[in-house]
Image: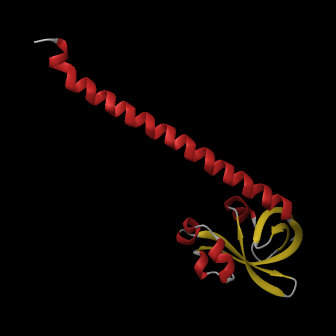
């Protein structure tokens, strides 16, 4: 019995497994690159449109976007993944209006409740904190 007859099937199986693993790795890298490009585009858009505003934070919670007091037209534009998972929502008073705002995780952790805070707003998204007041 020759080497190929004895171990041929195993070598072919290992080769196919390595080929599939390499294809998955390349696919992952391509998908990651596309997602990073989308994220960078969104971040530049937020940075272009952010304006400083003074808000009074009334409440902070993590909830589904559908349960927040956000216009339906805005909810329709949000990607499906954010409609399913819980996102940080801040109920804040901006001037005479009380609104629900979205924000990043790190901004959500830093926001004090029942305090006036100077933030950078981009639409209904809190992009960053400039300063807090006691």
Res 112 visible: no
Image coords of residue 127 (percent x, y): 78, 63
Image coords of residue 1 (percent x, y): 10, 12
Q: Place residue 50 in its image quadrant.
A: bottom right
Scheme of colours in the image? secondary structure
Q: How many marks?
A: 0
Work out whether residue 73 or residue 57 is closer to the camera in this orientation and state it: 73
Quadrant, the C terminus: bottom right
In this rendering, position of residue 104 left or right of residue 48: left
Name the residue located 62 percent from the left edge and 44 percent from the top edge. Answer: 33
Q: Place residue 62 in its image quadrant.
A: bottom right
> Compared to 100, does 50 lie above or below?
above
Res 128 visible: yes
Q: Place residue 110 in its image quadrant.
A: bottom right
In this rendering, position of residue 12 left or right of residue 50: left
Name the residue located 44 percent from the left edge and 34 percent from the top edge. Answer: 22
Work out whether residue 2 or residue 127 is closer to the camera in this orientation and state it: 2
Image coords of residue 85 (percent x, y): 54, 68
Image coords of residue 71 (percent x, y): 69, 83
Q: Residue furthest left?
A: 1
Work out whether residue 69 or residue 23 is closer to the camera in this orientation and state it: 23
Name the residue located 55 percent from the left edge and 40 percent from the top edge. Answer: 29
Work out whether residue 133 or residue 38 is closer to the camera in this orientation and state it: 38
């Amino acid at each position: 019995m020759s080497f190929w007859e004895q171990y041929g099937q195993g070598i072919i199986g290992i080769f196919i497994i390595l080929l599939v693993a390499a294809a998955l790795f390349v696919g992952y890298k391509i998908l990651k690159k596309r997602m990073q490009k989308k994220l960078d585009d969104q971040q530049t858009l937020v940075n272009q449109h952010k304006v400083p505003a003074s808000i009074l934070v009334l409440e902070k919670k993590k909830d589904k976007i559908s349960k927040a007091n956000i216009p339906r037209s805005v909810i329709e534009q949000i990607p499906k993944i954010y409609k399913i998972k819980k996102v940080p929502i801040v109920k804040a008073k901006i001037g005479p209006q009380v609104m629900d705002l979205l924000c990043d995780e790190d901004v959500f952790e830093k926001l004090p409740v029942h305090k006036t805070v100077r933030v950078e707003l981009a639409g209904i998204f809190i992009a960053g904190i400039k300063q807090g007041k006691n």
